[in-house]
Amino acid sequence: MARHVLQTVDSTNAYALRMAPETPGPAWFLGLEQSAGRGRRARPWASPRGNFYGTLLLHPTEPPEVIALRSFAASLALRDAFVSLTGLPGAFSLKWPNDVLLNGGKVAGILLESSARAGGFDLAIGIGVNLIGAPDVSAVEPGAVLPVSLLGETGLRVTPEAFLDALAPAYVAWEAAFVNHGFAALRAEWLTHAARLGEVIRARTGTQTREGTFETIDPAGNLILRMSSGPVAIPAAEVFF
């Protein structure tokens, strides 16, 4: 799989999508520094040098709702990479819909963006990892999971290039599982590492916040929240513990 390392870039997702017409196969774009990194809902993503900012560019042909399930493949690949580097499987968990937690704090996030093309889509799977530093807690929304760094929590210093060496093959394995066996294989594994499964959480969609028990994720990747009125399927939300 092709790999492009950029000393500085506005956003690895934006750059990957710009390069998509001349990038026929899967490719990783690693930015050592970002000037305009983005998180979910177009929020700025602090991008100091030393952390990981990478995007995997794919050209899938499935319907959009199937393509979106690759966020779970990315989550599982991230966890595998962390475990292979640290040897600490119990320290990492997966927060729906697209974060990885280390000792209960957010250490990595995923952002999928796409653009249509003839016969399919260009998909950018953007991944940010706090390798050596995390955003200041003052920048975090009240009630949100606090950010942590791999270095701060484990004492392990990993370069972005070394992290990609662990992440790239891990993603290849989960992409193969997804293509060959469907989402069911990913769903089963994801649930074994899900943060706060069976516990009361809050899911916010726009101005509405629902509170209930995190029961499962369904075969479409929706969060199933059991409320007093019964189970509710939530396709997208911000989750608070």
Image: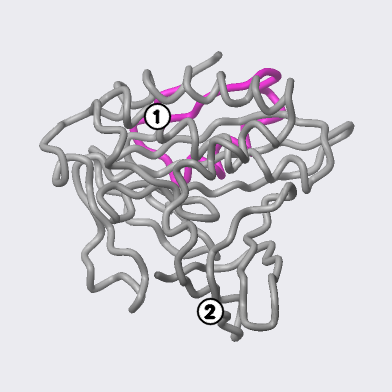
Which quarter of the figure has residue 105? bottom left
Above/below status of 63 relative to 160: below
Look at 40% across and 70% down and name the residue there.
Answer: 241
User: Is disc 1 surrounded by few (<14), some (14 to 19) or many (20+) residues within 10 Å?
Assistant: some
Look at 54% across and 38% down and name the residue there.
Answer: 15
Above/below status of 12 relative to 58: below
Where residue 60 sits: x, y (%)? 75, 31
The amino acid type, in three-letter code, at marker 2 is Glu
Above/below status of 70 relative to 59: below
Q: Depth-wise, is mark 1 or mark 2 nearer the camera? A: 2
Measure the C-alpha gap from mark 1 to mark 2: 43 Å
SS at mark 2? strand
Image quadrant for the N terminus? Answer: top right
Residue range in magenta is 4-30
**Which of these two is toward me, 167 or 29?**
167
**Which of these two is toward me, 138 or 37?**
138
User: Nearer the N terminus, badge 1 or badge 2?
Assistant: 1
Horizontal side, residue 219 vs residue 161: left or right: right
Q: Is residue 7 magenta?
A: yes
**Which of these two is toward me, 64 or 16?**
64
Residue designated by label 2: 211
Residue designated by label 1: 6
Q: Is residue 115 magenta?
A: no
Where residue 172 sits: x, y (%)? 56, 20
